[in-house]
């Protein structure tokens, strides 16, 4: 059985980085929804950064795959958040749907990777 561990210090760093980038997005945002976009940016980055930095497995291949998938989704989340931030959205519903679909896809891919490595 392969072991997976959660490291607290990298988790704290991941959450701090996500919060700071969320604050940056809220500061740079040119719409009246700057606080909402900043919070959403921080939360979505925390979801993608935590597995990348804080979860370690004894399976070396799983570590590489988790970091690679997480990096791709971190870039995608940042891209979507800053595009929305600078384009001053009128409706946040589309933004929440896109971010939600990205995060659910990420969680599904990560779950599939972890499940395959334990079989």
Image (spheres, grey):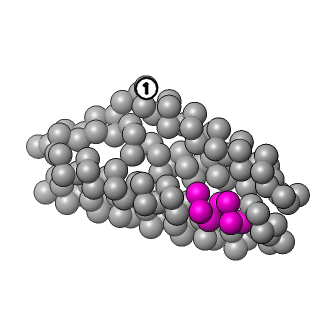
Residue of label 1: 9
Note whether 6 is above or below 103 in the view shown: above
Closer to the camera in the image, 34 or 103: 34
In magenta, the rendered stretch is: 78-84
**Location of residue 63 in the rendering, given as x and y in whole percent from the top left corner:** 26, 47
Q: Quadrant of residue 101?
A: bottom right
Secondary structure, magenta segment, majority class: helix
Q: Is residue 80 magenta?
A: yes
Is residue 109 at all visible to an observer of this figure? yes
Quadrant of image for the C terminus: bottom left
Which residue sits at x=74%, y=61%?
85
Dot 1: element? helix
Return the residue nearer the eye: 63 or 104.
63
At 29% from the left and 62% from the top, the residue drawn is: 112
Residue 38 in sight in this render: no
Residue 11 at what x, y percent from top left?
A: 45, 33
| Quarter of the image where the N terminus is located | top left
Q: Between residues 119 and 92, which one lies in front from this camera angle?
A: 92
Q: Is residue 35 covered in magenta? A: no
Give the residue drawn at x 16%, y 45%.
59
Q: Position of residue 75 (x, y in %)?
A: 51, 58
Q: Quadrant of residue 83?
A: bottom right
Location of residue 105 in the rendering, given as x and y in whole percent from the top left corner: 44, 67
Taking the image as shown, residue 99 lies to the left or right of residue 35, namely left
Point out the residue furthest to the right here. 32
User: Is 15 on the left or on the right of 63, as rendered?
Assistant: right
Q: Where is residue 30, by image quadrant?
A: bottom right
């Amino acid at each position: 059985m392969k072991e997976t561990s959660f490291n607290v210090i990298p988790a704290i760093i991941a959450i701090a980085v996500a919060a700071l980038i969320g604050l940056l997005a809220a500061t740079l945002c040119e719409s009246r929804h700057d606080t909402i976009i900043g919070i959403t940016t921080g939360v979505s980055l925390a979801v993608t950064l935590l597995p990348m930095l804080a979860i370690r497995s004894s399976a070396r291949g799983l570590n590489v795959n988790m970091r690679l998938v997480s990096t791709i989704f971190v870039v995608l989340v940042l891209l979507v958040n800053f595009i929305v931030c600078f384009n001053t959205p009128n409706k946040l519903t589309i933004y929440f749907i896109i971010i939600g679909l990205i995060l659910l896809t990420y969680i599904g891919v990560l779950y599939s990777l972890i499940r395959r490595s334990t079989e």
